Structure formats: C-alpha cells, structure tokens
Amino acid sequence: MQLNVPTLVLVDIYILALVGILMLHAWRRGRREPTLGYLAAALLLGVLGTVLVSALRGVGMDVVPLVLGNMVLHLSAAMTWTALRVFTGRQPHLPGICAGAAIWALLCLNPAFYESLTVRVAASSLITVSYTGLGAFELWRSRKNLEVAYLPALVLTLFHMAFYLVRIVVDRGMPFDHALASSGDGASFFSLLIFETLLYAIGIAFVTLAMVKERAELKFRAAAYCDPLTGVGNRRAFMTTGEYLVESCEHRKEPVALLLCDLDHFKRLNDNYGHASGDEALVAFTRIAVGSMRKQDVFGRIGGEEFACLLADADDEAGAQVAERIRREFAELPFQAPGELSVSIGIVSSKEGGYDLFNLLALADDALYAAKDKGRNRIQRYPAD
Ligand SMILES: Nc1nc2c(ncn2[C@@H]2O[C@H](COP(=O)(O)OP(=O)(O)OP(=O)(O)O)[C@@H](O)[C@H]2O)c(=O)[nH]1
C-alpha cells in the first residue's frame, strides 16, 4: 500500500504538536516534573524539525531542510534520551545533547557528504540509533531502582532503534523533489518512516507519562503508610499487612502471636529531657524491635509511643520470648539516666484470640493494661491473672 507522503507529513505535524502541547500541560500540572518537560521539548522540536525538513524541500533553499531541519530533529531525539535519563535520576548531559546536531552540521560542511543522499540517510539514521540506544541503556542500567513498569518504554525504544538500523540498509532516501514526494523512488519507505516515527513519539510520550504517574503514586502511598520519624509502617500499614499475615497463617493452620508494646512514662521522659530525647528513645526502640523480628513478621508504630509486632508461626510462648528480649534490651540501653527507659508489652496468640486482628489487638491491649497496672517494665500474656 502506498501512503501519500504530504498528507502523512501534515498528519504527523498536527499529532506531534497536539501531543507536545498536552505534554507541556502535564509538565506544568505535574509540578514541573523534568522528565515531562524534556519530553514536551522533544515533541515540539520534532514538530519544528518536520516542518523545516518537509515544507522547504526542493524550493531552492535546501540548506534549511537539509542542515537546519535535521539538526533540529537530532536535538529532538537527544531530548527524548534526556527525558529517560532524567527519569532514572541522572543529570542532563549537555555535550551529549548537542553532539548529534553538531556532528550533523560538521558533516554537512563536506560537499561529498552534502551531495550524497544515501550517505546522509545512513548518517542521520546512525545518530537516531545512537540516541535511541542511549535511552534504552538509561532504562536498562537503572532497572533495579526504577520500581515502575519500565518494560513498555524499553521495548518501544529498542523497536525504534531496530527500525532505524534497518533503515541504514534499506532506505535510499527521498529525493528533494516535490513531484516525487508522493510516488517517487524511496517514497514508500519514507511514508513508513513517518508512520513509525509518529507511533514511536506517541508511544514513548504515553508510557513515560504512565511511568511518571506511577512513581508519583508510589511516593504518595509510601508517605501515607510510613511513619516519618522511625521509618517503619504506621497504623494503616500495620493493619493492612497485618490482616494479610493473619489470614495466611490461618490458611496454613499456623499460630500467630501479637505483641503490643507501650513505652513507660513517656510523657515524663519528654518533660524531663525534651521532645528530641523522646524521639531518640522511639527510634532506639524501633531499632531493637525490628532487630528481633524475622522477615515474615510485621511491625509498626500504631500510636505515639505504641508499637505492635505480629509474629508469624509463633504461639504465645514464642511471643513471650521475643517480647522479653525486646523489653530487656530496651531497658539496658544507655540513656540520660539509668532506669529511664522501659516498655510494657501485652501478648496474645491466635490460641486465645483467634485469627481476627482487631480481636487480637483488643486482647493484647487488655494484657498491656495489666502489665502497666502491675508496675510497668514487664511482659504480660493474655489472659492476665
Ligand atoms: N517525643 C515524642 N513524644 C511523643 C510522640 N508521640 C507522642 N508522644 C508523647 O508520648 C506521651 C504519651 O503519654 P501518655 O499517653 O500519658 O503515656 P505515658 O506517659 O507513657 O504513660 P504510661 O503509658 O501510662 O506509662 C505524650 O506526652 C505524647 O506527647 C513523638 O513522636 N515524639
């Protein structure tokens, strides 16, 4: 099928401009996220480059489409690479951004290069392959830290690179003649080229926007589930992961133990040594408790000076052992004055409380209350005497 080149170019310009403006809008709305800014620049430079390369073909000013137009298109490719680079956490590389356009300008100073359509097509494709390859490389080398679905962007980029590699071998170029533009030698590959480049531009804009949105969502979710002082999960996180753990223990017919820990006389500690010292005590307790947990256990700060530990495959005896270790280590911590740090811990297991986290929490709270009542700095299993 032969596609009409001028029509395709017009469609290409309109769609790229529309996506570019939408990306600019997303950049402004998204707190000027640099990745979207570079992507918007890539799309709008793509529009300018396409206008320069196409509109002024064969009208006696070949230097504009051939030299300037292609330089702008190479800058556009560099911007797409930079968008992916910035997304992976690296700084833009200014010499790298300018290199493609500069190399093209230098090559055009050579009359043999300027006159040979085949060599120009090969060089232009090679520059595009380099920038696209760099974009894929940025994603690949950061894949372990990205935490978002990067594969669509990687596959799209590799496909675009492969297309331009094929172009080096297959394409003999579009001659600079309007009469040949829709039917002449090279027109069919050229129309395919416009088509592929347009799909790539839309595709990479869409998947990169999706990656940026996914990352923002992860950041908000982490903030909503994390206690900023201690870095562990807050009550919401504990309840969500805790319920899941309780359910899976029930499913495997394993016991589960809950420890409810409350630092003793914490108000007094704050009043005597200041809020910063109180914070230090909270962080120190977290360190000790987390150090006593296994990977499959769940721990969280569920209130001001209240923490909860859910131990998988542990009965109340195992829970009491862990609780006693935490209590002892915390009480032995060197602090402002000896005996200032202590914790009371209520313990309940699924043997008494069943596999309902709310019920376990209520029973552990009873045990904790009894521990406080008996003088604090102690562990207490449910049911209390
Ligand atoms: N430093 C600090 N203090 C906090 C934080 N969150 C809550 N608190 C304080 O923890 C104290 C808790 O006091 P209470 O509930 O009376 O409990 P308590 O003094 O530990 O008494 P008992 O639990 O009965 O031993 C309050 O003074 C809160 O201001 C925090 O993030 N940092």
Image (tube, rainbow, N blue to C red):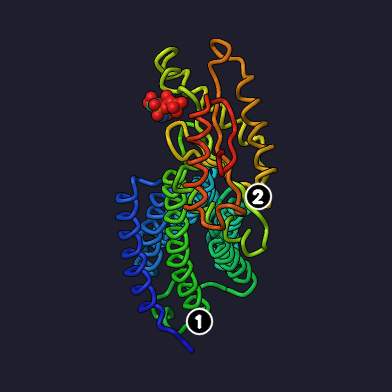
Disc 2 element:
loop
Few, some or many C-alpha atoms within 10 Å of disc 1 (few <14, some 14-19, many ≥20)? some
Report if residue 90 is visible in the image.
Answer: no
Front-most of residues 255 and 133: 255
Residue depicted at 43% across the width and 12% down the height: 272
User: Which residue does the image show at 59% across and 40% down from the upper left?
Assistant: 381
The residue identified by callout 2 is 296
- Image point (60%, 53%), residue name: 350
Q: Using the image, determine if residue 195 lies above or below residue 349.
A: below
The quadrant of the picture showing ligand 1 is top left
Instruction: Give the x, y percent position of residue 91.
Output: 51, 39
Vertical comparison of 119 with 339: above or below: below
- Please state which amino acid type lies under the numbered disc 2: Gln
Residue, disc 1: 188
Depth order, front residue of 188/157:
157
Quadrant in the picture for residue 73: bottom left
Q: Earlier in the sequence, mark 1 or mark 2?
A: 1
Q: Is residue 372 visible?
A: yes
